[in-house]
Amino acid sequence: MDIPDGWARSADGEALERTYRCKDFAAAFAFLTRVAAHAEAVDHHPEFTSRWNRIDFRLTSHDAGGMTPRDVALAKAIDALADRSTTDHDPTSS
């Protein structure tokens, strides 16, 4: 399974993970709102944590016991929903 650029396989190999950083809390909330609307439409929901302007995503298909093509598709959709206020962030620099 091809992993989209910017995403990484989790340590357990069962999920895709990526961290985004936005310019501020409002931009992060707006980004999560766009992701939530898409997730509802496709009935596939990401795990995420949000801390002020940082959002950590983990995509896995619990019913399948790990990562599936649906997670790859959701990763690509999340990337497409990012805007100028959303940037990649290297979590090792926090």
Image: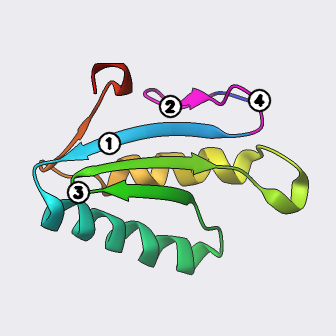
Tell me the kind of residue under disc 1: Tyr
Residues at circles 1 and 2 in contact by the CB criterion of under 8 Å: no
Q: Quadrant of residue 15?
A: top right
At mark 1, the secondary structure is strand
Foreground residue, 55 or 1?
Answer: 55
At mark 2, the secondary structure is loop
**Does 9 sit above or below residue 67?**
above
The span shown in magenta is: 3-14
Between circles 2 and 4, the one closer to the viewer is 4
Q: Tag 3 or tag 1, which sits nearer the N-term? A: 1
Between circles 1 and 2, the one closer to the viewer is 1
Question: Which SS type dominates the magenta stretch?
Answer: loop
At mark 3, the secondary structure is loop
Question: Circle 4 is placed at which residue position?
Answer: 12
Badge 4, how many Cα within 10 Å: few under 14, some, many 20+? few
Q: Residue at x 87, y 62 (%)?
A: 63
Q: Tag 3 or tag 2, which sits nearer the N-term? A: 2
- CA–CA distance in space, label 1 to label 2: 10 Å
Tell me the kind of residue under disc 4: Asp
Question: Circle 3 is placed at which residue position?
Answer: 52
Quadrant containing the N terminus in the rendered view = top right
Q: In the picture provided, is 79 more to the left or to the right than 10?
A: left
Residue 11 part of the magenta-drawn span: yes
